[in-house]
């Protein structure tokens, strides 16, 4: 394990603060340079002197202390850091960060930091399970924060449950893994997500069941892998991960424009969007009236965005998705060849889906490329997205070095 980085350790008020003393020792042992910031409450549990001795630097506790600010002001401290680690993160600190409050040094640094942020929560199990804390943690994740733990077990208060701060060795390991070179460091990735809406009249449209979860999870996983991500999204009710360049569209034609105009400036394109294959020939200017007789809508084909991206002179590494209700592998391989893709990720939808597919939290994927294939077992879409990004990075890096 090697952490040759500047780690800014922010200690908030909780009994687990004593474990952070060991954390400083371990981080330094693995090569990190550590500076410590403490909240006022944290100094009630462990003295600043302990952290000063272990880190080899004066500890920062105040936002408006002229002397400390002169030595290194809070913005310089935030810029100095390669990673900000809040450990332990109390329920109060998590709540403040999730809301963007900046009324002390720690919460101000959270806003000022542009580096990766890690949060290791520690609190009583009931406090952890409270929906307010869970909502705050979910919010932090949308800021791009990596949450480490907490772990189950006996608590300082005598109760047993989830809420113990992860052990210093485990925290060090996670930081080491995510600060080592990233598989898509600096690579530009364009992702399409969600459904499209094809209007019939001013109030009606044709759409599909896509929730956008897979595409948004992929955007997040690509960000975590070091990529610069542009997300072209159809209408979904998901928050975009902080740090992605989000472009919202409605129709297949708008999605085509948004993607084709950007594709050649990106190294990788991943088409997860469930783009309408057909769109009404005419959009009625007024709401279509109800009649007693049957009616029909004339549809025309939309452009196949994925195939169009693959035909561009400066095409990115192009990855498609195939959602199938039958003959999964054969249909997927057919699309790989016909659309001239670098890779295709196939999954079951509809009656054959077995828990996965559209609007589900989980999915399973079969990946195919020219000379290979790989199955990714049924898993939470976030985990699956990480695994898929790892395979895409592997194939992309191999193609670029051969
Ligand atoms: O051929 P099929 O529509 O099943 O292929 C699915 C793949 O093609 C997905 O990656 C989807 O994003 C993409 N697609 C597209 N434009 C369309 C239809 C599908 O980019 N008009």
Image: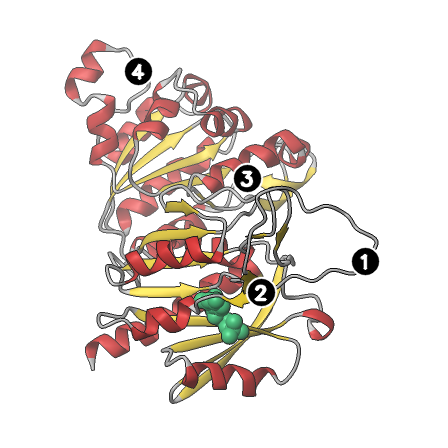
Looking at the image, tell me whether mark 3 or mark 2 is earlier in sequence order: 3
Looking at the image, tell me whether mark 2 or mark 1 is earlier in sequence order: 1
Direction from residue 125 to residue 334 in the image, left or right: left
Q: CA distance from mark 4 to mark 3?
A: 27 Å
Asked if the beta carbon under badge 4 is closer than 8 A to the nearest atom of ligand 1, the reply is: no
Q: Is residue 282 above or below residue 155?
A: below
Q: Which residue is mark 2?
A: 299
SS class, disc 3: helix
Mark 3 packing: few (<14 Cα in 10 Å), some, or many (20+)? some
- Find residue 77 and report its horizontal and vertical position in percent: 23, 29
Q: Nearer the viewer, mark 3 or mark 2?
A: 2
- Find residue 27 and report its horizontal and vertical position in percent: 31, 46
Q: CA distance from mark 3 to mark 2?
A: 41 Å
Q: CA distance from mark 2 to mark 1?
A: 20 Å
Disc number placed over residue 138 in the picture, else none: 3
SS class, disc 2: strand
- Judge whether residue 391 can be spotted in this image: no
SS class, disc 1: loop
Q: Which residue is mark 4?
A: 63
Q: Is residue 25 above or below residue 328?
A: above
State the image quarter where residue 185 is shown: bottom left
Q: Nearer the viewer, mark 2 or mark 1?
A: 1
Disc number placed over residue 293 in the picture, else none: 1
Looking at the image, tell me whether mark 4 or mark 3 is earlier in sequence order: 4
Measuring 54% from the left and 44% from the top, which residue is drawn there? 238
State the image quarter where residue 357 is shown: bottom right
Q: CA distance from mark 1 to mark 3?
A: 50 Å
State the image quarter where residue 308 is shown: bottom left
- Find residue 222 and report its horizontal and vertical position in percent: 38, 57
Looking at the image, tell me whether mark 4 or mark 1 is earlier in sequence order: 4
Measuring 48% from the left and 65% from the top, which residue is drawn there? 302
Asked if the beta carbon under badge 1 is closer than 8 A to the nearest atom of ligand 1, the reply is: no
């Amino acid at each position: 394990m090697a952490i040759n980085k500047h780690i800014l350790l922010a200690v908030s008020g909780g009994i687990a603060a004593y474990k952070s003393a060991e954390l400083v020792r371990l981080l330094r042992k693995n090569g990190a340079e550590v500076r410590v910031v403490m909240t006022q409450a944290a100094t009630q549990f462990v003295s600043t002197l302990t952290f000063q001795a272990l880190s080899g630097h004066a500890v920062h506790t105040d936002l408006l202390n002229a002397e400390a600010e002169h030595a290194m002001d809070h913005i310089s401290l935030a810029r100095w850091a390669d990673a900000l680690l809040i450990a332990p993160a109390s329920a109060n600190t998590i709540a403040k960060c999730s809301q963007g409050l900046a009324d002390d040094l720690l919460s101000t640094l959270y806003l000022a930091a542009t580096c990766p942020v890690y949060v290791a929560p520690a609190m009583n199990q009931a406090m952890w399970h409270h929906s307010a804390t869970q909502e705050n943690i979910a919010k932090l994740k949308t800021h791009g924060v990596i949450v480490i733990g907490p772990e189950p077990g006996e608590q300082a208060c005598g109760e047993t449950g989830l809420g113990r701060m992860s052990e210093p060795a485990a925290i060090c390991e996670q930081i080491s893994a995510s600060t080592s070179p990233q598989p898509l460091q600096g690579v530009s990735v364009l992702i399409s997500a969600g459904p499209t809406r094809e209007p019939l009249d001013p109030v009606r449209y044709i759409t599909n069941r896509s929730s956008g979860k897979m595409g948004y999870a992929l955007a997040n996983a690509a960000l975590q892998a070091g990529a610069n991500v542009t997300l072209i999204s159809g209408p979904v009710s998901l928050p975009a991960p902080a740090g992605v360049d989000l472009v919202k569209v409605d129709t297949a034609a708008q999605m085509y424009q948004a993607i084709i105009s950007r594709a050649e400036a990106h190294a990788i394109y991943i088409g997860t969007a469930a783009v309408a294959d057909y769109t009404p020939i005419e959009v009625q200017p007024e709401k279509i009236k109800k009649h007693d007789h049957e009616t029909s809508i004339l549809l025309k084909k939309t452009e196949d965005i994925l195939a169009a991206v693959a035909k561009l002179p400066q095409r990115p590494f192009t990855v498609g998705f195939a959602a199938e209700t039958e003959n999964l592998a054969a249909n997927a391989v057919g699309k790989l060849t016909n659309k001239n893709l670098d890779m295709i990720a196939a999954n079951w939808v509809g009656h054959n889906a077995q828990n996965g597919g559209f609007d589900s939290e989980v999915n399973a994927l079969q990946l195919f490329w020219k000379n290979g294939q790989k199955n990714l077992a049924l898993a939470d879409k976030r985990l699956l997205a990480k695994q898929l990004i790892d395979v895409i990075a592997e194939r992309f890096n191999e193609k670029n070095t051969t």
